Amino acid sequence: MNTAEREARLLEIGSRVVGTSPADETEIVFAEGRSLLTRFSRNAIHQNVGTEDVWACVRVVAGKRVGVATAGSLAPEALNGARDEALAMARASDPVDDWPGLPPPRPAENIAAYDEATAESTADQRADVAGQIIRAAKARKAEAAGAVDIEESTLAVVSSRGVAVAHSHTRAQAHTVMTCGDGSGYAEGLSTHLAEVNARAIGRRAAAKAVAGRNPKPIEPGRYDVVLEPVAVGEWLEMLSYIAFSGKNFEEGRSPLSGKLGEKITGEEVTIFDSAVSPRTIPMRFDFEGMPKERLTLIARGVAKAVATGHYRARRLGKRRSSGSALPASTSYECLPLHLCMKGGTSSAEQLVRGMKRGLLITRFHYTNILDPLKTALTGMTRDGTFLVENGEVVGPVRNLRYTENVLEAFGRIDGLSRRLTRVRGPMVVPALRVREVQFTGTTEF
């Protein structure tokens, strides 16, 4: 079945469920797809697995009472059962006095995000990607572990207000952690097209870090200037999405942006926006209410500009329409930006390093946790490539450190951004950053 047929089938099923619903308003969201995964470790493939999944979320309204239920099948009895369960939950719930109704349809831009060659790729092709990474490890006498993952999925939304949209996309990604003695290195790549995932470059980058990371030296905790590579930047940006950019958190006073729109909250170098329609990310036409995705500027030159909203939250905040950021009605997060991008600067990554008198080059973070959301305080570990820089030169590897840092404050201490932007898992599109005086509060033995 091709994508057009699959999308048409989901819209037909959704129309049938909605059309026979006894509720005042009904919405159904479908997500159907498959994931094909090849795992490798110790320089050998050890697992090939594939899964096919379907999920449906039904939201119904009785008066101003809202109920939500989910199903894991497209069978009529499963979908009708979820609809009836949602209706029963709605009738037993307290009314939402300011319920604005489900959103009416709005046209969504047609975005190319599906690659048939990627969707039809074979286990042999995934093995070839893994093999290129493994060969890069063997060439440097290192060991590679990681995975190659192919996903294809279709999202469809149908409602009694007339929304009826469907969109398909593919995603190909590969990542690896390489070890060489007591050194380790990490690299990744992702795209809508498997052919664009440069396995050789991923392997060489991780291997070079693993080899260079042997015999790491201890270093005292304290404040260090750092160059954060894109994967590390993406980790902080993803945490900010949950902490700062949700319209729900904003209205409830649980966001550091609450009451601060129009105010400077970080450095002028920082511009962050959500852009699901950009071909540089993994594009998405509409959100989980079927509302079109549009570019949304969240922070512009350090000034807080907006937060992400779905239909209900937009009306609560006095907006005419949502930002196209609604999540499935079954999740408590409600609305989030899912395709964050950060504007770059004018430097190369090498120039960022050369501009440090003494500091650290950080590949990525690990086990990042939120300590204080209002202060955007995070803690976590450096991992898989942490190096000391002196007088603009990388002088050697150091043992991993624990950081404890207020991210928005740290973004106020940026003094360099790379010109090149990199797509990292999320998906996000980010530069490398040089940040002054990041706080490290603990050491490790590795």
Image (spheres, helix red, strand yellow):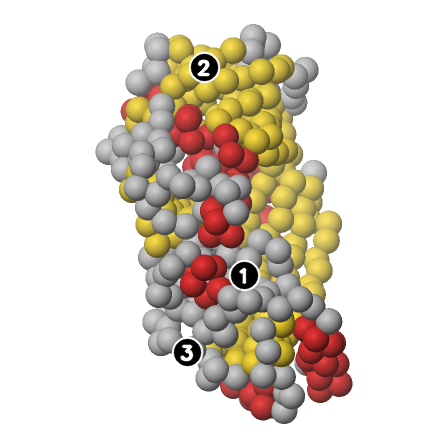
- The answer, for residue 37, to whether it is visible in the render is yes
Q: Quadrant of the N terminus?
A: bottom right
Residue at image location 36% in from the left, 23% down from the top: 413
How much space separates mark 2 and mark 3, taking CA atoms? 51 Å
Q: Looking at the image, is 209 positioned above or below residue 117?
A: above
Judging depth in this view, the residue of 6 and 209 nearest the camera is: 6
How much space separates mark 2 and mark 1, taking CA atoms? 38 Å
How much space separates mark 3 and mark 1, taking CA atoms? 17 Å
Nearest to viewer (mark 2 / mark 1): 1
Across and down, in percent, residue 251 comes to: 48, 49
User: Sequence-wise, which precedes: disc 3 or disc 1?
Assistant: 3
Across and down, in percent, residue 368 comes to: 59, 33
Across and down, in percent, residue 271 comes to: 31, 41
The tag on residue 327 is: 1
User: Sequence-wise, which precedes: disc 2 or disc 3?
Assistant: 3
The residue tagged 3 is: 105
Q: Looking at the image, is 225 positioned above or below residue 81?
A: above
**Residue density around tag 3, few if under 14, some if 14–19, many if 20 or more, within 10 Å:** some
Across and down, in percent, residue 412 comes to: 36, 27
Residue at image location 37% in from the left, 75% down from the top: 106
Residue at image location 46% in from the left, 30% down from the top: 407
The residue tagged 2 is: 224
Furthest residue in direction front, as rendered: 97
**What's the amino acid at mark 3?**
Pro
- The answer, for residue 119, to whether it is visible in the render is no
Determine contact: label 3, label 1, CB under 8 Å: no
User: Sequence-wise, which precedes: disc 2 or disc 1?
Assistant: 2
Judging depth in this view, the residue of 413 and 46 nearest the camera is: 413
Residue at image location 69% in from the left, 42% down from the top: 41
